[in-house]
C-alpha cells in the first residue's frame, strides 16, 4: 500500500505506529490461529481499541507494523474493514509488513529506511487499551521540544494514586508478571527529564538513587512503580537513532543508551506521568483478564462493550446494575426443570446472610428467566449474538462470543469463550480461554490458566489440569504455519485419558528452556529477565546483553559464512576477506574470540558446501583450508588463539558430527602443512580435555593416532630442547 | 490566644470527658436535674512547649562570634534571638525555654524587655566548654519539659522567617504528625558578595525525600552525609511519587511529640550518643517510620487496642491506618515564603541588608521603627530612605549614608561616607572614613577606606589605609 500523503499537509499530520508483534505473546495455542492483536477482548479485537482511541485523539495516520507470517493478511483485511466502515474518510490505516522484524528496534530501522515517518509520531503496542488524552500529551511534547531541542522522546507512564485492584485468582501457569510492566523512574522535578529508568523487580524493594543525579537537578521526582503502557511520543530523531545503533533492540535499551550517553549523543528523554485516564496493556493472559474486567466495568469509558468500536452502533443491551451486556439475539431459555434458573453474575452461589439478593427479570427471547445476583461485585458478563444460554448457567466475569450454546448447569468464572463454542451441561470453567469452535462435552472441568485452542473437542467427564494448553491438531500436520513451531513445542498424541473419549486435543508442552531462548530470539530483549524475578538490576542488564549478543552472534555467523562462500567462489584475496569479516565484526560488535570461532567453523563448513554434498569430504575441506589459510592466519596470533581454533573445531563436531572422520586430517594439516597450530598447543589442549564438550570423547579416539605421533615428535623436541637448555646452562 | 483556644478544642476531648464525669457525679449527689452549667473552673493547659536552642557557638561565622554569642548578633537593630521568640509569641505561646551558653543568661533574658516582647523566657544555661550539640542541649533541659504538653516546638535561635507558627501547628495536628519539620525553598543570598575574603559557598545541602502530595517525610539526610547512592526506604503506598530534594532548607524548626522526644533523649535510647538533633536524631525518627513495630508501644497503643477490641463500630480514620503500620509519621511543612537560617556570614550579611524591607514581614506587630525616634540625624546629613538607624545613633552633618544598617548608639562623624554597610552597636566612624559593602563591628578611630571588609578589632586599622576583602579581627596573640 503506497503512502498517499499530500505534501502540503505533511507538517500537520499526526502519525502513530502500532506494533502488532508485541513483545509478550499469549502462547502458541492462541496466536497460532489468530494474531494477538486480533484476539477479541469483550468481543472486540484488541486492535480496534487502539485504533478507536487513536482516531478519537485526532491521529491522522496509523501505521500498523507487522511481520510477514500467516496472520499478515488477516491484519490487513481487518484494517481495511475498519477503515471502510468509516468510508475511508476517517483515520488512515496503513499496514506495513516486514520480512525480518525481530523487535521494536528493527521496526524502527525499517520504517526509517522506508522514510514513512515525517514528524513526531506516537509509538505503541497493539495490545494497548487506553483512554488517555493523547492530544494533550502530544501538545506538551511539542511544547517541550520547542524549548529543548535535545528532547527526542516523551515516554508516557500512568501513576494512579490508588493501588489498582489485583486479580485475586490469577490465571495459573502465567507467572506473576505485574511487576514487569512497571518501572521505577527518577525524573527532574522541574522539567520532567528522565534521569533513571529501571524495571521494577518487586514492590517492596528499596529504591536506590545515585547521588550524582543531584548534579543534573536539585529536585528529583521519583516514581517507585509507575505503570508502563509502552507508549511514547517520538520525534523523527528516534528512528534514526535506532538505525545508527544496531544494538538498540527495544525501547528500554534506547532509554538506557540515551540516558547513559547523554553527553555523547546530546539527547534527552522526558516522561509524562499521567494521573487521569485509563491505559493498560493486555500483554499477558493474566493482564488480558484484568483489562477485560476493567473494560466491562467501564473504566475505559467511552470504549464500552455495548457499542461497537468499528461502527459505533449499539450492539449489546447493557444492564448497569449487574454490569451485564448481551446481544438482543442471545437466548436465555427457561429450563424444563422447575428449579432451574439462569444465574448471571452472582458472586457466590451461597449468598451470605446480609448480602442483598435481587431478583429481576432477565428478558430473553425464550421467555422470562430469573436472574439472581449476589453483591459480589464481579458480575461482569458479556454475551454475544445468537448465543443460547440455557437455564441454570452461572456466569461470572466472563465473556461469551457469538453463536455459542451453554447448556444447563455450566459454571464459568472468568472464562473467555470465543465464537461457535458449544459447552454441554455440567461443565465448569475457571479462568480459562476457550477458542473458536470448541466443543466441551458433558462434565468437562477446565481448570484455571488453561488455554483451549480453536477446534478442540473435549470430554465427556474429563478434568483438564491447571495451565494446560490444548490444540486441535498436532503441529506436524500443519506445515503451513510458522517454522519455529516444532522447535518450541513438543506435542503428544491425543490421549483419551486427557481429552476424553470423544475428545480431540493435543497437549502443547512448552519446553521451558527452549521457550525462553525462542522468546529471546523472536521477540528480542523487551521481556528479558522475566525468568529471573529476584535478580537485581545489574544481572538483569547482563541478561539483556546476553540475549542481544546471541542474536547478533547468529547474524554475524550468517554473514561470515556468506562472505566465505562468496570469497571461495570468486577466489577473493585474503586481505579482502579479512576486511569483509572485520566489517561484519564491527557491525555486530562481536569479540575477537567469537570471530575466530566463527571463521574457523565457517571455513570448514565452506569446504563442505563447496563440495556440494551434505557429507563433508576431505578434499572439499582441504580446498577450503588452502583457500582461507591466510585469512585464518590473520586471526591466529597467540597461543591462546590456537586453543580457540581447536575449541571451535570441537564445537563444530558437537553440532555436525559428520566432520568427525576428517578431524585428524584437519588437525594434521593445520599443524604440519599450514603451521597454524603448534604441536605443543594441540597436545596441551588434548591433555586438558579439549573444550569439555560431549564430542571430545569421540574426537579423542579419532585423533589418537595423530596425538601419538605428535607426542613422539615433541618428546624428541623436548629432548633436544633440554639438551639446548643444558648447553646454555653449561655455557 | 489562637493557639490555645484551638488546642483546647482538639485536645479538649479528654478534658471534656473528665468534666462530664465530674458533672454527672455532682448531679447524682445533689439530684440537680436541670443544671447543665458545671461550675468547674476550666483551666486551659498549654499543649505546646517551646524550646529555643541558642547555645550555638556559630562555628560557620567565627569572625563575628568571637566577640559576641551568636544568638545576640544584631540583625538590623535587634538581636537574632528576638526573631524566633517573636515567632513563638505570635503563635500565642506564653513561655519559652531558651538554652543559652553558660554566662550569657543575663544578657539573653534582657533581650525580651529590650525588644518589647511579652513572652516569658526561662533561660537554661548549658556549659559550652564541652561543645555540646543540639541534642545534648535538649537532654540538658529535658526535665524542664512539662509532662502535660503534647508537642514540643524546637526552634533554633538563628531562624528568620515569615511563616506563621500557628499554621505549622495546625498542619502538625491535622496530619496527626509525630514530627513536623519546617522547610522552605533554599534561596541564594540576594546581596553578594559578602564582605571578607572570598569563600566557597557552603555546598553540600540536605537531602529531603517527601511524598510529593502529602508532604510526608520519607528520608532525611543531613548535609552531604551520603555516598554514591541514596537508598529510599520501601514505602507501602508505593504509588505516590517521591520528591527527592536538595533544594529544600531545613529551617530547624520542629514540632515533635513529647513522648517521642523523651524516648529519643532518654538515657537508654538508641540515640543516646547522638549529638545533633538535625543531623542524627531527626533522620533516626524519620527512619523509624518504616521499621516494623517494636515493643516500645506506649500507653496510647494499649488504649487503641482496647478501643478496637471492644468497640467494633469505630471506623479508623486514615490517620489510624497510617498509624497502624507505624506509630510514627513525620511530615515536612513546606513554606513558600521567606525562611533563612542566619548561620553563615553570607546569610548574616544578606539578612542584615534586606532587613529594611523584611522587618514588617518577619516581625509583624512589633513596632520597631526603621528610624528610631531617639536617633539624632543632622539635617545636613544625607541618609537614604532604605537605611535603618537604631536608637541613640548620632549622624553628623555632611555624611552620606546609603542603604546602610546603623545599629543603636552608633556615631558617624562628619565627612564620613557609608554605603551598603552594616554597623554593629556602639560603633563610631571617625570623620573622613569611606566604608563600602562592609561589616563594621568595631569603631573606626582612624581615617581609612574599607571595601568588602569585616572589622571586629579597631586596633588593626591604620591611618589613611585602604583595606579590601579582608577580615580585620583580633589575632590570637592579642587575645
Image (tube, coloured by chain):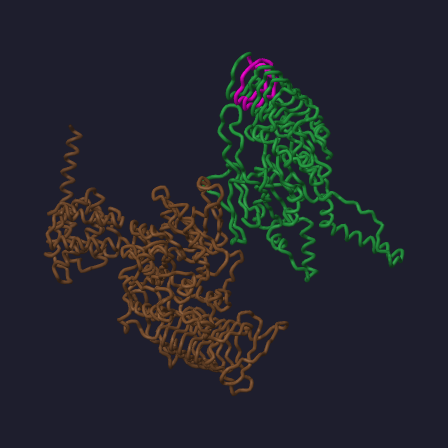
Outermost residue to the front = B380
> What quarter of the picture does the N terminus of chain A occupy?
bottom left
Residue B25: quadrant of the picture? bottom right
Report x, y in % for residue A205. 48, 51
The answer to whether any part of residue A290 appears in the image is yes
Residue A531: quadrant of the picture? bottom left
Q: Nearer the viewer, residue A255 or A149?
A: A149
Q: Which chain is brown?
A: A
Residue B222: quadrant of the picture? top right
Q: Is residue B130 above or below residue A601?
A: above
Q: Is residue A337 left or right of residue B42?
A: left
Outermost residue to the top = B463
Residue B447 among magenta residues: yes
Q: Which chain is green?
A: B
Q: Nearer the viewer, residue B39 or A708?
A: B39
Q: Which residues are magenta?
A: B436-462
Amino acid at each position: 500500500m503506497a503512502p498517499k500523503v499530500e505534501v502540503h499537509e505533511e507538517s500537520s499530520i499526526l502519525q502513530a505506529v502500532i506494533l502488532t508483534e508485541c513483545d509478550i505473546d499469549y502462547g502458541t495455542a492462541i496466536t497460532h490461529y489468530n494474531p494477538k492483536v486480533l484476539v477479541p477482548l469483550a468481543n472486540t479485537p484488541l486492535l480496534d481499541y487502539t485504533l478507536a482511541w487513536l482516531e478519537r485523539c485526532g491521529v491522522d495516520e496509523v501505521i500498523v507494523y507487522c511481520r510477514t507470517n500467516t496472520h499478515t493478511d488477516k491484519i490487513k483485511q481487518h484494517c481495511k474493514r475498519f477503515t471502510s466502515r468509516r468510508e475511508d474518510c476517517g483515520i488512515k490505516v496503513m499496514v506495513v509488513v516486514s520480512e525480518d522484524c525481530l523487535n521494536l528496534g528493527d521496526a524502527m530501522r525499517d520504517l526509517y529506511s522506508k522514510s514513512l515517518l515525517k514528524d513526531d509520531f506516537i509509538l505503541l503496542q497493539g495490545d494497548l487499551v487506553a483512554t488517555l488524552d493523547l492530544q494533550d500529551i502530544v501538545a506538551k511534547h511539542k511544547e517541550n521540544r520547542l524549548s529543548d531541542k535535545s528532547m527526542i522522546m516523551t515516554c508516557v507512564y500512568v501513576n494512579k494514586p490508588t493501588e489498582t485492584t489485583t486479580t485475586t485468582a490469577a490465571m495459573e501457569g502465567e507467572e506473576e508478571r505485574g511487576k514487569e510492566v512497571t518501572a521505577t523512574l527518577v525524573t527532574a522535578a522541574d522539567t520532567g527529564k528522565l534521569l533513571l529508568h529501571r524495571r521494577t523487580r518487586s514492590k517492596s524493594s528499596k529504591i536506590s538513587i545515585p547521588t550524582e543525579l543531584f548534579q543534573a537537578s536539585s529536585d528529583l521526582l521519583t516514581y517507585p512503580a509507575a505503570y508502563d503502557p509502552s507508549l511514547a511520543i517520538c520525534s523523527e530523531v528516534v528512528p534514526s537513532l535506532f538505525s545508527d545503533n544496531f544494538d538498540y533492540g527495544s525501547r528500554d535499551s534506547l532509554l538506557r543508551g540515551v540516558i547513559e550517553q547523554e553527553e555523547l549523543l546530546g539527547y534527552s528523554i522526558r516522561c509524562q506521568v499521567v494521573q487521569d485516564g485509563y491505559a493498560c496493556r493486555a500483554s499477558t493472559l493474566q493482564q488480558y483478564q484484568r483489562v477485560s474486567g476493567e473494560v466491562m466495568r467501564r473504566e475505559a469509558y467511552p470504549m464500552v462493550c455495548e457499542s461497537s468500536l468499528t461502527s459505533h452502533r449499539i450492539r449489546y443491551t447493557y444492564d448497569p446494575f449487574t454490569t451485564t451486556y448481551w446481544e438482543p439475539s442471545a437466548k436465555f431459555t427457561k429450563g424444563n426443570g422447575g428449579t432451574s434458573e439462569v444465574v448471571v453474575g452472582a458472586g457466590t452461589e451461597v449468598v451470605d446472610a446480609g448480602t442483598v439478593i435481587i431478583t429481576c427479570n432477565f428478558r430473553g427471547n425464550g421467555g422470562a428467566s430469573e436472574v439472581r445476583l449476589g453483591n459480589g461485585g464481579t458480575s461482569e458478563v458479556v454475551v454475544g449474538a445468537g448465543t443460547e444460554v440455557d437455564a441454570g448457567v452461572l456466569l461470572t466475569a466472563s465473556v461469551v462470543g457469538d453463536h455459542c450454546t451453554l447448556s444447563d448447569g455450566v459454571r464459568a468464572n472468568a472464562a473467555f469463550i470465543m465464537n461457535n463454542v458449544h459447552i454441554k451441561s455440567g461443565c465448569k470453567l475457571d479462568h480459562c480461554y476457550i477458542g473458536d469452535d470448541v466443543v466441551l462435552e458433558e462434565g468437562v472441568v477446565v481448570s484455571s490458566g488453561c488455554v483451549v485452542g480453536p477446534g478442540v473437542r473435549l470430554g465427556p467427564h474429563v478434568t483438564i489440569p491447571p495451565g494446560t494448553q490444548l490444540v486441535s491438531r498436532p503441529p506436524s500436520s500443519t506445515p503451513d504455519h510458522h517454522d519455529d513451531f516444532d522447535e518450541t513445542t513438543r506435542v503428544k498424541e491425543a490421549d483419551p485419558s486427557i481429552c476424553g473419549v470423544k475428545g480431540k486435543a493435543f497437549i502443547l508442552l512448552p519446553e521451558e528452556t527452549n521457550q525462553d531462548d525462542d522468546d529471546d530470539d523472536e521477540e528480542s530483549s523487551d521481556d528479558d529477565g522475566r525468568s529471573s524475578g529476584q535478580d537485581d538490576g545489574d544481572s538483569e542488564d547482563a541478561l539483556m546483553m546476553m540475549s542481544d549478543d546471541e542474536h547478533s552472534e547468529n547474524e554475524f555467523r550468517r554473514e561470515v559464512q556468506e562472505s566465505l562462500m562468496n570469497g571461495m567462489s570468486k577466489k577473493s584475496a585474503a586481505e579482502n576477506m579479512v576486511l569483509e569479516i572485520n566489517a561484519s565484526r564491527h557491525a555486530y560488535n562481536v569479540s575477537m574470540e567469537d570471530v575466530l570461532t566463527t571463521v574457523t567453523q565457517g571455513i570448514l563448513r565452506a569446504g563442505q558446501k563447496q563440495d556440494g554434498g551434505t557429507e563433508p569430504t576431505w578434499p572439499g575441506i582441504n580446498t577450503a583450508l588452502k583457500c582461507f589459510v591466510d585469512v585464518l592466519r590473520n586471526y591466529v596470533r597467540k597461543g591462546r588463539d590456537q586453543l580457540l581454533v581447536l575449541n571451535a573445531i570441537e564445537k563444530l563436531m558437537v553440532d555436525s558430527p559428520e566432520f568427525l572422520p576428517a578431524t585428524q586430517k584437519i588437525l594434521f594439516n593445520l599443524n604440519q602443512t599450514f603451521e597454524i597450530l603448534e604441536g605443543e598447543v594441540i597436545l596441551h589442549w588434548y591433555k586438558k580435555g579439549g573444550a569439555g564438550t560431549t564430542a571430545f570423547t569421540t574426537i579423542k579416539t579419532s585423533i589418537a593416532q595423530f596425538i601419538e605421533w605428535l607426542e613422539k615428535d615433541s618428546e624428541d623436541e623436548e629432548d633436544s630442547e633440554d639438551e639446548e637448555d643444558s648447553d646454555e646452562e653449561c655455557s | 490566644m489562637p493557639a490555645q483556644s484551638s488546642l483546647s478544642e482538639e485536645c479538649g476531648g479528654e478534658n471534656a470527658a473528665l468534666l462530664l464525669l465530674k458533672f454527672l457525679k455532682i448531679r447524682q449527689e445533689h439530684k440537680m436535674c436541670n443544671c447543665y452549667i458545671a461550675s468547674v473552673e476550666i483551666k486551659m493547659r498549654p499543649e505546646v512547649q517551646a524550646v529555643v536552642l541558642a547555645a550555638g557557638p556559630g562555628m560557620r561565622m567565627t569572625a563575628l562570634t568571637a566577640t559576641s554569642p551568636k544568638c545576640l548578633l544584631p540583625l538590623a537593630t535587634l538581636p537574632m534571638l528576638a526573631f524566633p521568640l517573636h515567632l513563638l509569641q505570635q503563635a500565642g505561646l506564653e513561655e519559652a525555654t531558651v538554652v543559652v551558653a553558660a554566662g550569657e543568661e543575663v544578657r539573653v533574658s534582657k533581650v525580651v524587655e529590650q525588644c518589647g516582647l511579652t513572652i516569658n523566657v526561662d533561660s537554661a544555661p548549658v556549659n559550652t566548654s564541652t561543645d555540646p550539640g543540639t541534642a545534648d542541649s535538649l537532654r540538658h533541659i529535658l526535665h524542664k519539659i512539662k509532662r502535660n504538653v503534647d508537642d514540643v516546638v524546637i526552634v533554633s535561635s538563628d531562624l528568620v522567617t515569615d511563616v506563621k507558627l500557628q499554621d505549622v501547628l495546625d498542619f502538625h495536628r491535622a496530619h496527626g504528625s509525630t514530627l513536623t519539620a519546617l522547610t522552605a525553598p533554599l534561596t541564594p543570598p540576594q546581596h553578594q558578595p559578602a564582605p571578607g575574603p572570598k569563600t566557597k559557598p557552603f555546598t553540600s545541602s540536605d537531602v529531603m525525600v517527601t511524598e510529593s502530595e502529602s508532604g510526608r517525610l520519607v528520608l532525611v539526610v543531613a548535609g552531604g552525609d551520603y555516598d554514591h547512592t541514596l537508598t529510599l526506604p520501601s514505602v507501602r503506598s508505593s504509588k505516590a511519587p517521591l520528591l527527592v530534594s536538595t533544594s529544600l532548607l531545613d529551617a530547624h524548626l520542629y514540632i515533635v511529640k513529647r513522648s517521642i522526644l523523651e524516648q529519643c533523649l532518654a538515657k537508654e535510647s538508641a540515640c543516646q550518643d547522638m549529638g545533633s538533633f538535625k543531623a542524627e536524631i531527626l533522620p533516626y525518627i524519620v527512619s523509624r517510620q518504616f521499621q516494623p513495630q517494636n515493643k516500645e508501644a506506649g500507653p496510647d497503643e494499649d488504649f487503641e487496642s482496647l478501643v478496637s477490641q471492644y468497640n467494633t463500630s469505630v471506623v479508623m480514620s486514615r490517620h489510624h491506618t497510617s498509624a497502624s503500620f507505624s506509630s510514627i509519621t513525620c511530615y515536612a511543612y513546606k513554606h513558600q515564603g521567606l525562611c533563612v537560617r542566619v548561620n553563615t556570614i553570607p546569610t548574616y550579611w544578606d539578612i542584615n541588608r534586606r532587613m529594611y524591607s523584611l522587618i514588617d514581614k518577619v516581625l509583624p506587630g512589633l513596632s520597631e521603627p526603621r528610624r528610631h525616634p531617639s536617633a539624632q540625624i543632622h539635617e545636613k546629613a544625607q541618609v537614604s530612605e532604605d537605611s535603618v538607624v537604631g536608637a541613640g545613633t548620632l549622624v553628623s552633618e555632611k555624611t552620606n549614608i546609603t542603604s546602610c544598617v546603623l545599629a543603636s548608639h552608633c556615631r558617624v562623624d562628619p565627612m564620613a561616607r557609608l554605603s551598603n554597610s552594616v554597623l554593629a552597636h556602639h560603633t563610631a566612624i571617625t570623620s573622613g572614613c569611606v566604608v563600602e559593602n562592609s561589616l563594621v563591628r568595631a569603631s573606626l578611630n582612624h581615617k581609612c577606606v574599607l571595601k568588602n571588609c569585616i572589622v571586629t578589632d579597631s586596633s588593626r586599622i591604620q591611618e589613611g589605609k585602604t583595606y579590601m576583602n579582608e577580615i580585620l579581627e583580633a589575632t590570637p596573640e592579642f587575645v
